[in-house]
Every structure is written in C-alpha cells, then in structure tokens.
Amino acid sequence: MAGLNRLTRVQIRRSAFIAAALIGFISPGGSSISQRIVEVKRLSENRVEGLSKARLLAAARAGGDYLVRMQRRDGSFVYSYDPITDHAGSRNNIVRHAGAAFALLDLYGATHDRRFLASGKKAVAFLRTRFRSRMAPKTLDHRVIYVLDFDGKAKLGANGLTLIALTRLIEFESNSNLLSDSKALARMILTMQREDGRFESYYRLHGDEPTGDVSLYYPGEAMLGLIRLYRINGDLRLLDAARRGADYLIASQKQMNQPPPDAWFSQALEALYGIDPKAAYADHAVALAEAMMAGQYVDSPDEYRGGFGPGVPRATPAASRAEGMLAAFRVAVSRNDPRAAGILEAIALSLRFQLSQQFTGATASPLKRPSRALGGFRESPIEARIRIDFVQHNVCSLLGAASDKVARFAGYD
C-alpha cells in the first residue's frame, strides 16, 4: 500500500476509536472513552528519528527486561497487562509463552546477559509442565509428547515453538533430557503431517478440534523447529518432513492472488535454503516479503508510517513481518539479488514504527506504574495494552536487524 488519502485516514481512525470503545476502552477506574484515547495518544508522541545498532540492541534488552520483570516464580508470565489501569490479566497461552521463552534465549545469545538465560530456562521449565505423553505410532520409535494449551487443545504451533525454544537452549546448555524432549516433540509434529506435506493444526484429543490447516503460522513454526533439531541430531526424517511441508506450502500459496504474510514460513525457508540452496526456497521467501511490503504504510501520517494495514497499524504485525522480511533479506543478499535493497528499506520503516510503540522513560512517565511497563510494546498507537507475544516478536526482529550482517549492510553498525 503506497499510502492513505485524507478521507481514508479519517475513516480508519474513526473506526478504530469506535472498535476500541466496543472492546472495553472504558477503564475499571471510570475513565471516559475520550479521556482514554487522549491518554494513549499522548503516549505515542515520542517518535523515533534514526536507527543504530546500539539503539536496536538497547530496545531489545529493554523488552527482555520487561519479560523478566513480568515472569512469575513458577516460570510463567503475566500474559497481558494494561499499563493505564495497572491491571494484569489472568489468561495464559502456551504458544505465546513458548515464543517468549525463545526470545529470552535469543537475547542471551546476542548479549551474553545471564539474566536472560536464567529467565529463559525458567520459562522452559514451565513449558515442560504442559508436556503430555501419548503412545507412539508403529512407524515411530520411542515416546511422543505434545504441549497442552490452557484451552485444552494440543496445537501444532505449541509443539513447533516449544521445539524452537528447546533447541535454542540446547545450543547453550545441552543435556540428555532436553534432547529427549525435543525428539519426542518432533515425533508428534511428524504424526501431524499428511502424505502431501500439509500439517494438521491440532492433534485430536477430544474430537471437536478443527481439521486441516487452520492456522497460517503453525506450519512454518513446526518446520523451523524440525530444521533446528535436524541441525543438532542429523535425523533425515526431520529434514524430509520440512522439505515436503515447504513444497506443499509453496505450491498452495502460488495459487493465491497474493501470498499471505507468512513470516514463520519465511524463516523456515531461509533455514532450508541454508541446508539445500534451491532457488524455489529463495524465490518464495522474497515473494512473501514483497507481499508483506505491499501492505506497509509508506506515504502516510507519521503515526502510521512503517506499520501495516489494513486499519490501525499494530506493533506485532509490524514486528512479525519484519522477522519474515529479515529472513528474505538475508537470503537475497546471499544470492546478490537486487531486491534486497527494497526489502531492507521496508524493514527500516518497520523498525521505526516498532520502536515508537515501546514504552520508554518518556512515554511511560504518565502511567500509574511507569517502571512496570518500561520496555513493553503496546498494541498500537491507540491501545496501550502489552502482551508477551507483542514483546517477543519485537525483541526478535530488533535482534535480527541488529545482527552484524544486517547492520553492516544497512550502514548503521
């Protein structure tokens, strides 16, 4: 999307404000809708003018500090927090918990700050309390485990992201239990793949689960987990499953009018390309990036610029798309693909938008408890709520952009 005309901007803002009111913009303390909007808008006034590796790393660290601060003794996290009312939600989501664990471990890898390693290990320990065993099919050896979410469902994405987190931890502290659990998680993913390469989104525990490919992101998460474990143990069954999954998705997404913003699949394609540099993997990763770029607000009001439509741009879609575009960018650079420069420009715009959604000392000062929200990423320019997956995706994309390879190419190292 090249930009928004004035009428469209007004319509989007009006629709967003109405929607915000409908979903609970009136705070428990009795603030009116208009007062709430003014409060959130005031928090959006501090815009980011430039980028640097130091700035990106500092913002990622601050996001990690938020996760550490919001982690409970048992390793779980405060899933959702409203910094305007200082109200912490009681819900939880094990898929997003696994993502937060991975983000903390990624932070440790980038910073060597052992606080992030300790917090990531606690998060993994909590993940393991959600592991459930089942009888292994005759085609597989040993045990099979799935991750049970708090809604009673066994989701492909939970196994995929948990496998990503465990294999990341193995890179720092390998032990037999972690490897055994990783293999058992991978076996469950293999049982959820059909012969044509597609994955079921749910393992059927109760019989009422949706069938087929329900979630856009679950297959990419699962494939990336399989590839990461393959790099550790060399099990060719894992690589074969990832290849078949990628072939199926590439073929099915090519039939669409425009590829979806499948950021996890982009990362899985990058990982596959690193093992087996097929042009099809690289070309589709770039195609996914270009489809994401088409939805970016470029010639738009400052508060929207760099975010993604439709509607009010949100921090998490901006961050997750940046993760996908970063994967495509690295592949494009490795092939001397001239489209790399355009992808990098879109990433830079996204980073500026993402950073503008983070609570800093200046933007957190009007809040009831500024120190609690510090480093968190709010949902959007008009909604101050923070969730652990908002933070996870922003931390990971900031770290990716701050890596030596990207920073050197971008000129902000």
Image (cartoon, helix red, strand yellow):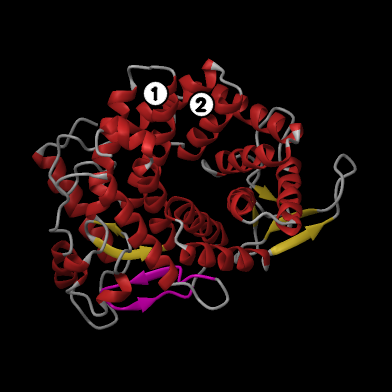
In three-dimensional space, the C-alpha distance between marks 1 and 2, rounded to whole angstroms, equals 23 Å
Membership of 401 in magenta stretch: no
Q: In the rendered image, which quarter contains the C terminus?
A: top left
Whether residue 27 is visible here, answered yes or no, is yes
At mark 2, the secondary structure is helix
Q: Where is residue 332 in the image (x, y as percent from the top left)?
A: 41, 23
Is residue 255 visible to us here? no
- Crowding at dot 2, Cα within 10 Å, few <14 / some 14-19 / many 20+, comes out as some
Q: Give the range drawn in magenta.
A: 76-90
The answer to whether residue 229 is above or below residue 23 is: above
Q: Main secondary structure of the magenta part?
A: loop
Residue at 23% across, 64% down:
360
Looking at the rendered structure, the kind of residue marked 2 is Gln
Question: How many numbered marks, from 0 up?
Answer: 2
**Lateral position of residue 207 relative to residue 365, left or right:** right
Single out the mark in the foreground, 1 or 2.
1
Q: Which amino acid does label 1 sit on?
A: Val
Residue 196 horizontal/vertical position (percent): 70, 27
Identify the element where label 1 is drawn.
helix
Identify the residue under disc 1. 333
Q: Which residue is drawn at 55% across and 24% down?
A: 250
Give whichever of 69, 264 is nearer the camera: 69
Quadrant of the image containing the N terminus: top left
Q: Residues within 10 Å of mark 1 (few under 14, many from 20)?
A: some
Give the mark nearer the N terminus: 1 vs 2. Answer: 2
Q: Horizontal and vertical percent for residue 228? A: 62, 41
Closer to the camera in the image, 411 or 75: 411
Query: Is 87 within the magenta?
Result: yes
Disc sitting over residue 253 in the figure? 2
Residue 146: x, y in percent?
Answer: 71, 55
Please state which of residues 38 and 95 is positioned toward the viewer in this rendering. Answer: 95
